[in-house]
Amino acid sequence: MQLRFFVLMLAMLSTASAMGGSTSVVDEVFDRYLIAVHAGDMDAVRAMIAPDVERSDYAGCRAEMDNPTCLAHYIETTVVKPRARMTELRRRVEGDTLFSDLEVRSPLYEQAGAPRILGQDIVRVRDGSIVAFRFVPDFSDDATATFFGTLGIGPRAPRQ
């Protein structure tokens, strides 16, 4: 497991380097996030989330969850447990905010008839911790719209 983690870390760092040359603290935090998610390491993910992180709008969060618990629950439920594999297509950093265009593959999506989804992680970082995090699906992509439609989200969601 440690060798696999090390190989993943090297791959992520070389991807970041190839995508933009130098890395910032924001880049480094997101690289660590990707490594932790791919390794299924929720302790590492939780350690990156600031105590004052913005509230996630994830429907699976319960009122009694504090904001860090809600975001960790969202990440665990949507990418860690379904063993999602994210491929970064493009990345840009503006100040303390990272925008990462992603292709995400998971058995969960395949079960819904989508070989993969496309979207963008938008992550704001302060003092080396995640203070805001959201995923914005690319509904112009058929597979993405199909998958989210099965969840009742987006343009392919059944009309009420």
Image: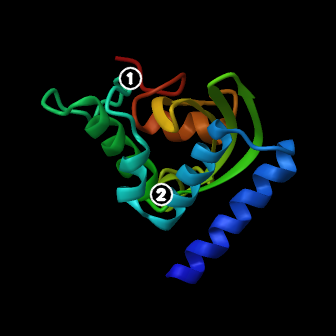
| N-terminal-most mark, 1 or 2 | 1
Q: Extreme top residue here? A: 160
Q: Position of residue 143 (x, y in %)?
A: 63, 42
The label nearer to you, 1 versus 2, is: 1
Front one among 147 and 95: 95
Which residue is disc 1 drawn over? 54
Using the rendered image of the protein, determine whether residue 81 is visible from the camera's viewpoint: no
Apparent side of residue 65 relative to residue 71 in the rendered image (left or right): left
Q: Amino acid at mark 2?
A: Gln
Relative image position of residue 18 (x, y in whole percent)? 86, 52
**Mark 1 residue type:** Glu
Task: Give above or below for 111 relative to 98.
Answer: below
Judge the density around disc 2: few (<14), some (14-19), many (≥20) Cα neighbours within 10 Å. Answer: few
Query: On the rendered structure, is 60 left or right of 148?
Result: left
Residue situated furthest left in the rendering:
64
Give the structural element (helix, strand or loop) at label 2. Answer: helix
Where is mark 2, residue-wise?
111
Q: Position of residue 85 (x, y in %)?
A: 59, 59
Occupied quadrant, residue 121: top right
Which residue is depicted at the point 38% across and 49% down?
47
* Label 1 environment density (alpha carbons within 10 Å; few <14, some 14–19, many ≥20): some
Q: Is residue 147 above or below residue 84?
A: above
Q: Which label was assigned to residue 36?
A: none
Measure the C-alpha gap from mark 1 to mark 2.
Answer: 31 Å
Residue name at image x 76 percent, y 50 percent: 16
Q: Position of residue 104 (x, y in %)?
A: 61, 50
Q: Quadrant of the C terminus?
A: top left
Residue 63 visible within the image: yes
